Amino acid sequence: MARPEQIEAGQAAYSPIVLGIYDWYVHGLSNHLLWHCPTSALRQLYDRNVSARHIDIGVGTGYFLDKAKWPVAKPSITLVDLNANSLDAASRRIARYAPETVVANAMESLPLSGSFGSAALCYLLHCMPGAIPDKAVAFDHLRPLLKPGARVFGATILQGSLPRSRAAQALMNIYNRKGIFSNAADTVEDLDSALRARFTNVKVEVLGVVALFEAAAF
Ligand SMILES: C[S@@+](CC[C@H](N)C(=O)[O-])C[C@H]1O[C@@H](n2cnc3c(N)ncnc32)[C@H](O)[C@@H]1O
């Protein structure tokens, strides 16, 4: 079971200064040079899955929420994060949609009700402690909040047997030591099984060391 300090470490890095360079560092550089997953693929993932009533868990700067092609002019968006800096940055970024913000740990039951049409967990799972079967508790807490047919999607950086450059492995090792990442035991097989046990129409695509996943609630 995850210890409180491990959960804390997975979100502690997101200070206002880090969030100030996050988009440039992660979506500008790392995705391309280290993780070999184009940021455009993640944007397309959002574009084809977001709905008029969306919940986003692990929001960072709100980059994808800002760029997404929403199906309505004024989507209802709920932002969930354990870190108040992330909630602040993302909610200011998409203030035009007047999002609701909720401070919560994705590994515990969420203090929310409702029937969302889409839910995103983008680059969240690799920040959470444990292996994929432990992290999948986040899907369990999400399920009661989804309406039938709701889209569940996201992306996570994996290890397992995926080939990666020395630079990518070295950086992952550092992040894992610091607790910023906890993905040492994360495999695409476990991710696929966790999704199939809870959702339908599961699709998992691996680009570089990133798994992009999409599924539907029933
Ligand atoms: C790597 S950032 C991803 C941001 C954004 N989704 C993106 O793809 O650019 C991870 C975010 O998840 C949040 N986070 C980490 N662990 C969490 C947890 N256990 N519960 C809720 N949020 C968490 C962090 O505070 C941070 O905002």
Image: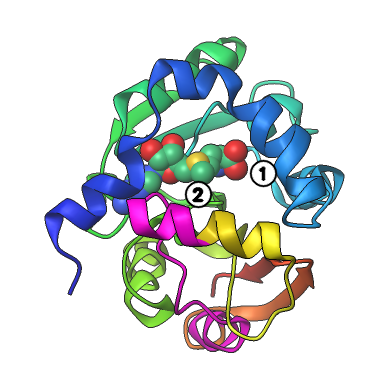
Residue 42, x across and y down, in percent = 76, 49
Q: Residue furthest left?
A: 4
Q: Which residue is mark 2?
A: 116
For the C terminus, the quadrant is bottom right
**Which range of residues does the magenta coloring cover?**
173-195
Left-right relation of 153 to 31: left
Kind of residue sitting beneath label 1: Ser
Q: Which residue is mark 1?
A: 51
- Is 181 magenta? The answer is yes
Tell me the chief SS of the magenta region. Answer: helix
Residue 110 versus residue 191 in the image, above or below? above
Label 2 sits on a secondary structure element that is strand
CB-based contact (under 8 Å), mark 2 and mark 1: yes
**Label 2: few (<14), some or many (≥20) within 10 Å?**
many
Residue 203 versus residue 128 in the image, above or below? below
Q: Residue at x 72, y 70 (%)?
A: 164
- Is 73 magenta? The answer is no
Report, in whole angstroms, how far the alpha carbon at label 2 lies from the one at label 1: 8 Å
Left-right relation of 196 to 65: left
Q: Residue at x 76, y 37 (%)?
A: 29
| Mark before the other along the chain sequence, 2 or 1 | 1
In the image, ligand 1 is in what quadrant?
top left
Residue 30, x across and y down, in percent = 71, 44
Q: Residue at x 68, y 67 (%)?
A: 214
The image quadrant that residue 202 belongs to is bottom right
For the N terminus, the quadrant is bottom left
Label 1 sits on a secondary structure element that is loop
The image quadrant that residue 210 belongs to is bottom right
Kind of residue sitting beneath label 2: Phe
